[in-house]
Image (spheres, rainbow, N blue to C red):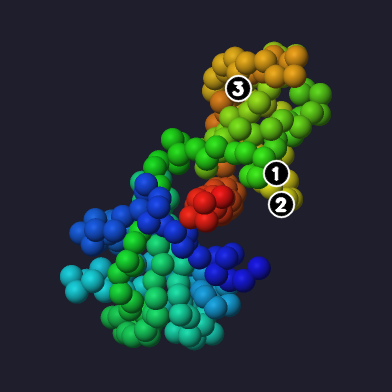
Amino acid sequence: MPDADALHLLDDEEHSPFALHDPQQIGQVLRGLAEARAQIATRLVPGGHACPTALLEVRDDRTLVLDGNRDEAMNQRMAAATRVVCSAQLDLVPIRFRLSTPRRTLHEDYVAFTAPWPAALLRLQRRESYRLPLSATATATLLPGADADGRTLRVLDLSAGGLALAVPDDAIHGFQPGTRLPPCRLQLGDAEPVPVAVEVAWTARDGVRGNTAWWRAGCRFAELPAALEQQLMQYIFRIERQRNARLRRGG
C-alpha cells in the first residue's frame, strides 16, 4: 500500500463535519497544542518513518516551528519529507493535520523545522462521543471470554472510548450494566485481534432478526493503552476516507 494511502490525513477532509478551514480557528488549535506542550506523532512522506515531535512556536505569519530530533538521521529524513502527517490530542480531542515541505532551521540553538500552517485541520468530537457506524464493508468483532460461550460478537459502532455490540437474547444475561467482561479480543477488519478490557454501560432491545431477539450493548473501554487508542483512530479515519471516496464517485 502506498504511503499516501497508509499514512496521510483524509484527502477529502473538506467533507468532514469536523474539519476547520478558517485560519483563525486553525491558529487557535495550533497554539493550544503548543501551550499544552502536546506530543505530536508524525509520519513522514515519503518513507513512512515515525518521528515524535512538539510544536515550539506558532507564528502570526502563519508559519510554525516543530521540534527537531536528537537523532540526526531522523532530522535528515524530516528535511527530505514532502509532507508530514501529524496526529495529536488536545483535551482528549483527536487532532489531525498535514504539513508540507518542512525546512530545517535553529530554534534557541537547537535543530527545529518550520512549515506553513496546514490548510485544513481535522478536530474530532471528544473520543467518548464520536462513534463510527460499522457495516458489511467495515467490520469489527469482539471475542469475549469463556463466560460468553466463546461466541464472536459483531461490533455495531466504534470509537476510541467504547463500542456497541449486537448481543443475542440468550447471551444478554452476561451483559448487565456495570459488568466487566472477561478478557476480550477486538479484531478490526483483517488485522490481528488485540486484547481489550470492556465494561458494559447500557443495554437496549434491538429488534428481531432471523427469529432471534437481539440487544444492543453499549460498552466502554477500561484502561485503554495509548497505542491501541491510536490504532482505533487510524481505523476510523481509514473507513471514513473510503466512505467519502465512494460518495464522491457516486457509489
As displayed, is residue 216 above or below residue 236? above
**Residue that appears at 61% across and 32% down:** 156
- Residue at the spot of label 1: 187
Picture quadrant where residue 158 is located: top right
- Residue 135, horizontal then vertical, whole percent: 62, 39
Direction front: furthest residue: 250
Q: Residues within 10 Å of mark 3 (few under 14, many from 20)?
A: many
Q: Residues within 10 Å of mark 1 (few under 14, many from 20)?
A: some
Q: CA distance from mark 2 to mark 1?
A: 6 Å
Q: Tell me the number on the disc at residue 250.
A: none
Which badge, 2 or 3, is on the more N-terminal residue?
A: 2
88 in relation to 170, above or below: below
Q: Amino acid at mark 2?
A: Ala
Left/right placement of residue 10 relative to residue 59 reads right
- Amino acid identity at mark 3: Arg
Disc 1 from disc 3: Cα separation: 18 Å
**In this rendering, the label closer to the viewer, 1 or 3:** 3
Residue drawn where x is 66% and y is 26% of the image: 166
Mark 2 and mark 1 in contact? Answer it, CB < 8 Å.
yes
The quarter in which the N terminus is drawn is bottom right
Which residue is denoted by mark 3 in the rendering?
216
Q: Which residue is mark 2?
A: 191
Q: 94 or 223, which lies in front?
A: 94
Under mark 1, the amino acid is Gln
Considering the numbered disc 3 on the image, is that residue within a helix, a strand or a loop? strand
Q: Position of residue 224 (x, y in %)?
A: 57, 42
On the rendered structure, is 57 left or right of 52?
A: left
